[in-house]
Amino acid sequence: MSASSRAVRAIAACVLDKAPARPWRMSAADYRAAVARTSGGRPPGRLTEAPWDAELAGVMAEYGTAVVEELVADVLLEGLAEIV
């Protein structure tokens, strides 16, 4: 794992530990659902383990597709409407 990957993990772990922040729509299951409804995309780039979901990086590597917010905006907006 590179130094920058370790730094990103450390920052994410700190935010999750110290603040009431929680990842939203960022699990391996969310990723699989997003990939199933898109027509493919760019490779995901450098992957690091996500402190909130140990399975996510492996699933992203398996599918090899980045999911950008614009492709799932409708799902995100529906989810926001449910919690607001």
Image (spheres, helix red, strand yellow):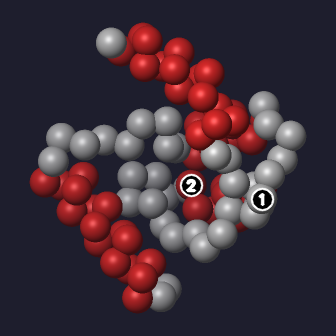
Q: Is the C-beta separation of discs 2 and 1 under 8 Å?
A: no
Vertical side of 27 occupied by 18: above or below: below
The spot of residue 17 in percent (x, y) is 18, 55
Measure the alpha-carbon separation of dots 2 and 1. Answer: 17 Å
Picture quarter containing residue 66? Answer: bottom right
Secondary structure beneath label 1: loop
Vertical side of 36 occupied by 46: above or below: below
Q: Disc 2 designates what residue?
A: 56
Q: Earlier in the sequence, mark 2 or mark 1?
A: 1
Q: How crowded is mark 1: few (under 14 residues within 10 Å), some or many (20 or more)?
A: few
The spot of residue 84 in percent (x, y) is 33, 12
Q: Can residue 29 be seen in this view?
A: no
Q: Disc 1 designates what residue?
A: 42
- Residue depicted at 37% across the width and 71% down the height: 8
Query: From the viewer's perspective, is 63 left or right of 29?
Result: right
**Which residue is the extreme one toward the left?**
18
- Residue depicted at 66% across the width and 69% down the height: 45
Vertical side of 28 occupied by 15: above or below: below
The spot of residue 82 in percent (x, y) is 42, 11
Front residue of 32/42: it is: 42
